[in-house]
Image (cartoon, rainbow, N blue to C red):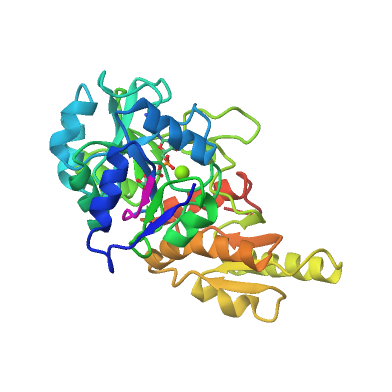
Amino acid sequence: MITRLLRPVSDPAAIDTAAGMLLNAKLVAFPTETVYGLGALALSGAAVAAIFAAKERPATDPLIVHLPGRRWLGRVVSQVSVEAERLIEAFWPGPLTLILPRSAAVPAAVTAGLPGVGVRVPSHPIAAALLRAVDAPVAAPSANRFGHVSPTTAAHVLADLDGRIDAVLDGGPATIGVESTVLDMCGPEPLLLRPGAISRQELADVLGHPVCDSRPSTARADLPQQAPGQLVHHYSPRAEVRLYGHADGSVLEQMRRDAERDAAAGQGEPPAWLLLDEDAAATEGVPGRRWLLGPAGDLTHAARRLYPSLREADEWGAQVVLAHLVPQPGLGEAINDRLTRAAGGRVIGKR
Ligand code: TXA
Ligand code: MG
């Protein structure tokens, strides 16, 4: 299969072409404000099956359904609680996925047989225009091979899926860079399944109470996953990620010592370092190449740079990536969640 690269900046028909392909049950990757998604018609069992095949994704991992707008909700879910309404009002369009009781119209493959379906209305202008042109729900997981780092550019999509999908719509780099927050609204309390671009605090502010936790950092690598999407090994580059605790002088000192010890022992290639701007001085002179994620005080840059840096470290040939947890508030929880999963759930040193 030849994968077409569609460029809305230079081709005014690109979005209509992509919409036509989706309506013909084809697979089209497209940009969203979080990461690139691999889209297919959500209400077509055959189209949805093709997503699982292209990504080599296990049938047990459900897909998020992307809606052109709020008014489509009634087609795919059977019930919307008062709390869900409040969240929708506050955060849609945007990077919040709600798991709500699914309607009979949704193929079982989309939800991996679960009673709830994940839904969101993306805010990215190209995603929004595409969904309007399709005028139907579009299922879209992140457009990467299963388990790999999510793509934030069309080039990342092609690196994973060229020849396996029909087209990719190039909308430049994704704005946020980490995936949507996933909140399960099917039980008695909202349950945070995946921290993401909408923070725990923002959710609590709208709900008037904290959300319950189902964080993968509490999951263990040696146990089966507790809920879909909580696989500990996920969002991983090829290189081994060695993740240290929150940076302070002693953590940076330990990272530096470990790297110097490995270099002295002639162990492997020099490592890739994923660092906040403030850390650069503390690791100066240590072997390896540095990827700077921006200042600790503004994690929007770190969120945007996280996945591209991991991909670049792989391309550079890194065997080991050295990183540490970032400050937790806001986007920090999502970044730390992805770093922890990339490291297989292990954090070295104090947290
Ligand atoms: O930002 C995003 O959410 C991106 C863009 C493309 O929208 N999509 C994305 O999809 O990250 P995916 O499939 O890579 O991750 C969705 C996560 C998975 O971990 C999945 O298990 C969970 O959401 N999920 C989806 N539907 C679910 C359901 N019905 N019940 C429980 N978890 C669900
Ligand atoms: Mg994914």
Is residue 29 part of the magenta span, yes or no? yes
**Residue 343 visible, this angle:** yes
* For residue 143, side relative to residue 201 (left or right): right
Of residue 300 and residue 60, the one placed in the foreground of this image is 60
Of residue 347 and residue 166, the one placed in the foreground of this image is 166
325 over 19 or under it: above or below: below
* Residue at position x 54%, y 37% in the image: 56
The tally of labels here is 0
Of residue 119 and residue 334, the one placed in the foreground of this image is 119
* Residue at position x 40%, y 67% in the image: 301
Which corner quadrant of the image does residue 322 belong to?
bottom right
* Residue at position x 36%, y 65% in the image: 172
Q: Magenta stretch? A: 28-33
185 over 311 or under it: above or below: above
The picture places residue 149, in percent across and down from the top left corner, at 52, 52
* Residue at position x 23%, y 39% in the image: 67
Is residue 69 part of the magenta span, yes or no? no
Quadrant of the picture in which ligand 1 is shown: top left
